Amino acid sequence: MSVKTESKLERILAAGHLAITSECGPPRGSDPEVIIKKGELLKDHVDAVNVTDNQTSVTRLSSLAACIHLKLTGVDPVLQMVTRDRNRIALQSDILGAASFDINNILCLSGDHQIFGDCKEGQNVFDLDSMQLLQTVRHMRDDGKFLNGDDINRPPRMFAGAAANPFAEPYKIRVPRLAKKIAAGAEFIQTQCIYNLDRFEEWMNGVCDRGLHEKVYILAGITPMKSLGMARYMKKNVPGMDVPDQIIDRLAGVPKEKQAEEGITICLETIERLKEVKGVSGFHIMAIEWEEKVPEIVERAGLFPRPKVSDE
Amino acid sequence: MIVGQQKPLAEIWEMVRKHRKVLVLGCNSCVAVCHQGGTKQAEVLTSLLRMQATQEEAEIELVDGGIERQCEHEFFESARDAISRTDAVLSLACGVGVQFMAEKFHATPLYPALNTTFLGAVERPGFFTEKCQACGNCVLATTGGICPVSRCAKRLLNGPCGGVNKGKCEINKELDCAWCLIVNRLEALGKLDDYEDLFPLKDWSKDRAGGPRNFKVEGYLP
């Protein structure tokens, strides 16, 4: 896959390195210090940092603004953009806004339903879905045109990504759904958190059988469990999350004060096993409210120091 | 059909209580099928309002009645006299009927007794489900006859989100995931491969987004 953008993430992947991305949720306020601190904490240990877009539909500082703060600290941000809150005018406009700050990565999502957030009575938009947003990004970049066909002066040059959940129903379309996202323009994929390794490997086999791993970079989603309570909550309450009983049992088998450590150990074992899985191009480490653990995980997983790539 | 649901009695009473004579007018089409807006329901609602009036010692005369449809001129002939003799009309029609009547009886106060809820089907007696949002640009040919615009909470056109749980939508455990239904139906039709066809950006200008719609049938226009 040839390099098409200035994205550091893309160049690391294209060079054949295992890439590392992480995640930063903007604050519920306008203080940029929180984001800058997270950026400083992560920047030497990861290749790019995703910025969530009003995740779980809770209103926060905008993803684009937070990406700009991160960019200024020297981080390569991944702008997460959901189609829930903006129509095609606003989406194209924000893509151009991000491109004007040379934000080089975008993750195209539909977004959680607003019923889970702080504006349950609000309208949702969904003018486009995540696949159509991918098509829009690629059209703007590759054809240099707006959706209506008009030329864009200095088109956005973004590395286009999408999410994939190998564990969600209906299972029979899990591989076809990835193929469809690639056809829509996805160049990298960040997966849902992986706890059920057998099922993930089964999905990856299907992906490789169709040669899809040669058309897209797949970053395996990793979230360390902070406690037994978190594991139980994710198993029971988070749709599309597959937490096998072995994970619960392992965390339950150690004293409460050792559970976080056990969570990190499980996470490192997961990374070790996934390094060997054909088609895995890197890891997307989402340490929820536990960002300070990311550098340790990267180091202990033998993925530090991060590779340097030229700016060419 | 159009499905409606009666507003809470307290809200209805608040709308009509200041009038001296109110005609409670049912509509015997769609909203009668869902047991909310027909002549029979108008009669029951009138009784409830009379009880409320007695409790509050309000001087209000309530008369009930009904016509076949409140969205066509011809059916109003039988109600014209009753409407002309009342101070206000409480309509049990859908929003279409209420507005149609408002245009016909320019100086008569009109109140909606129903919340118009959706375009739906009679799933089983007493249970109605939404099936269509009248987007003006039908997609059912490519989605196995199941509509993601009206039945997916995010109206996704290219497949399910990650929130499916045992075939149900993450926002409501009683709601089937439209995309699970679509995928199963495509499989039954031997067309599961069609799932991979990308659905292009939808033209929403034929939907609500394009402004109020009308439709003219040449040859039937006066």
Image: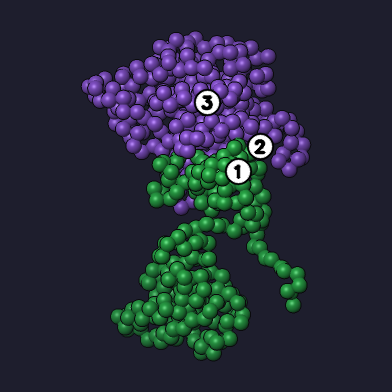
Chain colours: A purple, B green
Residue B36 versus residue A106: which sits nearer the camera? B36
Q: Earlier in the sequence, mark 1 or mark 2?
A: 1
- Residue type highlighted by circle 2: Thr
Say if A238 sits above or below A302 in the image.
Answer: below
Q: Are marks 1 and 2 on the same chain?
A: yes
> At 33% from the left edge and 21% from the top edge, which residue is drawn?
A263
Tag of residue A206: 3
> At 43% from the left edge and 71% from the top edge, which residue is drawn?
B36
Q: CA distance from mark 1 to mark 2?
A: 9 Å
Q: In the image, which is nearer the foreground, mark 3 or mark 1?
A: 3
Tag of residue B175: none
**x, y percentage for residue B111?**
49, 75
Residue A135 versus residue A227: which sits nearer the camera? A135
Q: Earlier in the sequence, mark 3 or mark 1?
A: 1
- Residue at image mark 1: A128
Dot 1 and dot 2 residues touching (CB under 8 Å): yes
**Is residue B111 visible in the rendered structure shown here?**
no
